[in-house]
Image (tube, rainbow, N blue to C red):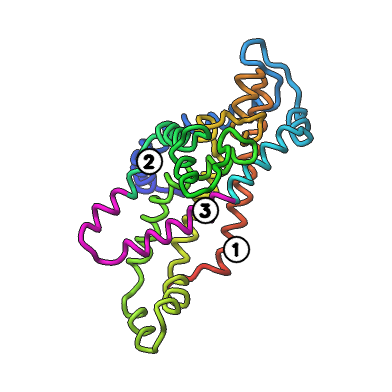
Amino acid sequence: MVGPRGVRKAAVVALFLLPSAVPLLLFTIAPMLGAAWISLHDWNLQSPMRWTGLDNYARLLGDAATRDALLHTLYFLGLYLPLAYVLGLALAVGLNRRFPGRNLVRSMYFLPVVTSWVVVALTWKWLLNPANGLVNHALEAVGIPGPGWWASAGWAIPSAVVASVWKDAGFVMVILLAGLQSIPEEYLEAARLDGASAWQTFWRVTFPLLTPSSYFVVVISLISGFQVFDQIYVMTGGGPAGASRPLVQQIYDLTFRYGDAGGASALSLLLFALILVVTVVQQRLQRRWVTYV
């Protein structure tokens, strides 16, 4: 049995947890439970809800628009994740060296991370304007015909990827830079004394010891990538002709364009389940490739 002292201790712990537990309950757990309940109904946000059970889930699993939205999301991830990681890693390695004004340069590369997505998306929509954007003007100046970018079905998602990588590379840089600075200098010095080249030192020593930071970046980037919405909605609106509509925009459209709150809630829970499965798989696989000092 728990004595008076244990009860007092539990009460103190609960008191300190309240500032975090109450917002978590009100703004995360309660909405999730509400979405789960709505997903079992047919509801257009106005008329009374009508019970449908698992019909919304069955309909979505066979829906062509939902399948296309999933493929668009996976296509975005396939381009975004490696580009953001490689660029962030290159910046981290370059800015880990000592040179005058290093802190200022680091701040400049991190500035897009704290910039509003709407501002970033509008800026890149202007830069990638097929008719008079600066990017196409620069390409034409060197004899390369500029693509249609966000106005083209084939280039709409890559356009959003360009904006996303530009914005998020600074975040990846900061995480990997912290990982680089946590590597003991003795390991690098030992590799150099053994005659290892700069590339061999990076690939055989630095990169393996950077895998914990890389794992964190991959997990966060995948979770964020599956929820891509703002940049695509501002730059392309999911077009042209639905060619860039991701899963989150499909949820938005089901709710506010088609009055299908039940289907939107079901799709949001299916997306949650997908992200959860991918995260669990990553957690299992990290034991094989992540090296902890």
Residue farthest along the left direction in this orientation? 100
Span shown in magenta: 79-108
Q: Amino acid at mark 3?
A: Val
Is 101 colored magenta in this rendering? yes
In this picture, residue 189 sits left or right of residue 50: left
What residue is shown at x 37% (from left), y 43% (from top)? 112
Is 100 colored magenta in this rendering? yes
Do labels 1 and 3 touch, CB within 8 Å? no
Of badges 2 and 1, nearer the viewer stands: 1
Do labels 2 and 3 touch, CB within 8 Å? no
Residue designated by label 2: 17
Q: Quadrant of the C terminus?
A: bottom left
Of badges 2 and 3, nearer the viewer stands: 3
**Above/below status of 203 relative to 57:** below
Choose top left, top right, bottom left or bottom right for residue 187. bottom left
**Residues at marks 2 and 3, CA–CA distance in whole angstroms:** 27 Å
**Which mark is first along the chain, 3 or 1?**
3
**Above/below status of 37 relative to 154:** above
Residue designated by label 1: 285
Choose top left, top right, bottom left or bottom right for residue 197. bottom left
Residue designated by label 3: 219
Q: Amino acid at mark 1?
A: Leu
**Residues at marks 1 and 3, CA–CA distance in whole angstroms:** 12 Å
In this picture, residue 125 sits left or right of residue 155: left
Q: Position of residue 29 (x, y in %)?
A: 52, 34
Q: Circle 1 sits in a helix, a strand or a loop, which is it?
A: helix
Label 2 Cα neighbours within 10 Å, binned few <14 / some 14-19 / many ≥20 = few
What residue is shown at x 69% (from left), y 26% (from top)? 263
Q: Amino acid at mark 2?
A: Leu
Q: Circle 3 sits in a helix, a strand or a loop, which is it?
A: helix
